Amino acid sequence: MQIGICDDEREAREYIADKIKRLYPSDSIYLYASGELLLQADVLPDILFLDIQMPQMDGMETARRLRQKDKKLVIIFVTATADHALEAFDVGAFHYLIKPFSINKFTEVFQNARRQILEESSNQNPPVRNTPGILITTGGKHIHIHLADIVYAEVYDRKIMIHTMNSDIEYYGKMKDLEKQAGENFFRPHRAYLVNLYYITKYDSSTIYLKKGQALMSKQKYPEFVKHYLHYNQKLCRRL
């Protein structure tokens, strides 16, 4: 696996590189002294440890530009302050390590990041259907829908429209009832939308983009969503 370390302090770069070599000697390590040098690289790493407080272009701006080139790059911020923690999730950061961190914490975050990459590369199929489903009535028919198949649901013309990867099904019902049935793998970012966290590809403070379609994000819900989605990803990694 290819691991990048971007920090303007040589000692900091070498410290993290040493930890990586001890854990995974076969990994390739790339060192960058600035965000500018990182952005000039022909090939980006799989996992990037990125300092925030750097002269000229800081880590947050570097991350924003990186996201324009690579949506899947796993970014782990490493910094001395928690001031930018919430902002970090705007650029889809995997984690936020605060210096000084323990070797146990570093190992945990690094291994979870590796597991996420391995999962994405080896399993592109929907999750196993060991989750419950819901029974809805539409057009005089009773239809059973696995929760794992629901990408998102929205209120549409006083009905609920359920979107799966292969179909769109509408029925009369209440979103709050569906939200209760759906469980913790779903989140309601807006009164008119309910999304399955598994199908999220990216998000910002106004929109959640899914493998099929997109949902609106309420400003009031955004901080709660970020925490919920981070918890979901951490729990997913622990299962691997």
Image (cartoon, grey):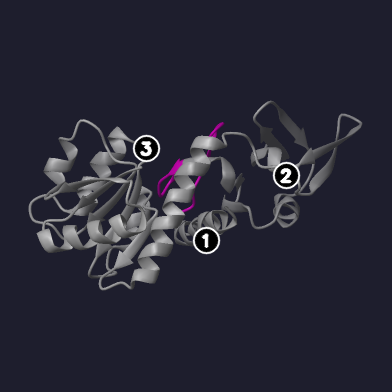
128 in relation to 60, above or below: above
Residue 45: image x %, image y %? 29, 41
Q: Amino acid at mark 3?
A: Lys
Q: What residue would you read off at disc 1?
A: 231
Is residue 118 in the magenta section? Answer: no
Residue 190 shown left or right of residue 99 in the figure: right
* C-alpha span from label 3 to label 2: 26 Å
Residue 153: image x %, image y %? 66, 41
224 in relation to 214, above or below: below
Q: What residue would you read off at disc 3?
A: 71
Q: Specify whether residue 70 is in view.
A: yes
In the rendering, which numbered label is found on residue 36? none
Whether the residues at callouts 1 and 3 have beta carbons within 8 Å, the answer is: no
In the rendering, which numbered label is found on residue 147? 2
Q: Quadrant of the N terminus?
A: top left
Seen from the viewer's position, the closer of residues 93 and 174 is: 93
Q: Amino acid at mark 2?
A: Leu
Residues shaded magenta: 202-218
Q: Residue furthest left?
A: 56
